[in-house]
Image (cartoon, grey):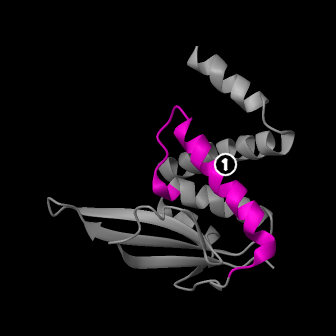
Amino acid sequence: MVFIRKCKALLSLDYKTVLLFIEALLYLGWIRFQVLYFPFNKIAPTLGIFMKETDSTHIQKDHEILSRIYIAIDVMNRNTFWETKCLVRAIAAMRMLEKRKIDSTLYLGTAKDASGKLIAHAWLRSGALYITGAEEMNGFTITGMFAKHVQ
C-alpha cells in the first residue's frame, strides 16, 4: 500500500523532477557500490583537488538547480531500501553538480561522540549553500576537503 502511494506521488510530479529523482537514485546506488567495494584512495582522486576549496560566494543562477538537487538527494535517500551514509550522499550530489558544470567542495570531518568514540562525517557545499550534511556538520573538525572545479 505504501509503495503504491509513493508511486502515485512520484507520477504526479513533472517529468523533470521525476528524472532528477531517478538520477539521484542511480548515483546513490552507484556511489554506495563504489564506497563499499573500492578503497577510498581509489575514489579520492576523482573528487577534486585535495585540501582546496571552491569559491563560497553565492551564484544566483545556480540557486534553483542546487535546491532541486538538495531535495532529490534528500527524498531518494529516505526512500532507498539500502542505507545511504553521508559520504555517499555527498559524492552523489557532487557528481550531479559536476554533470551540470557547477563547482562544489566536499568536506570530511571527525569528532568524538558522547562515549568518546571517534566518528566521521562528510558534507557538500556549492557556493554559499550546503547541499548535503549541513544538519550534522557543526562540531566536526575538518580533516580533509576536495574542491571540484568544472568550468
Residues drawn in magenta = 58-87
**Which quadrant holds the N terminus?**
top right
Up the image or down, 128 lies above or below 88; here it is below
- Find residue 30 and report its horizontal and vertical position in percent: 63, 46
Outermost residue, left direction?
115
| 114 inside magenta stretch | no
Instruction: Please name whichever residue, 10 or 32, is drawn nearer the observer in this view of the structure.
Output: 10
Which residue is tagged 1? 72
The quadrant the C terminus occupies is bottom right
Is residue 72 on the magenta stretch?
Answer: yes
Mark 1: few/some/many CA within 10 Å (<14, 14-19, 20+):
many
Image check: 7 left or right of 11?
left
Q: Report the residue at 17% width, 60% height from top.
A: 114
- Which SS does the magenta portion mostly show? helix
Residue 74 location (% of width, % of height) = 58, 48
User: Which quarter of the figure has residue 125?
Assistant: bottom right
Q: Is residue 107 found left or right of 129 in the rendered image?
A: left
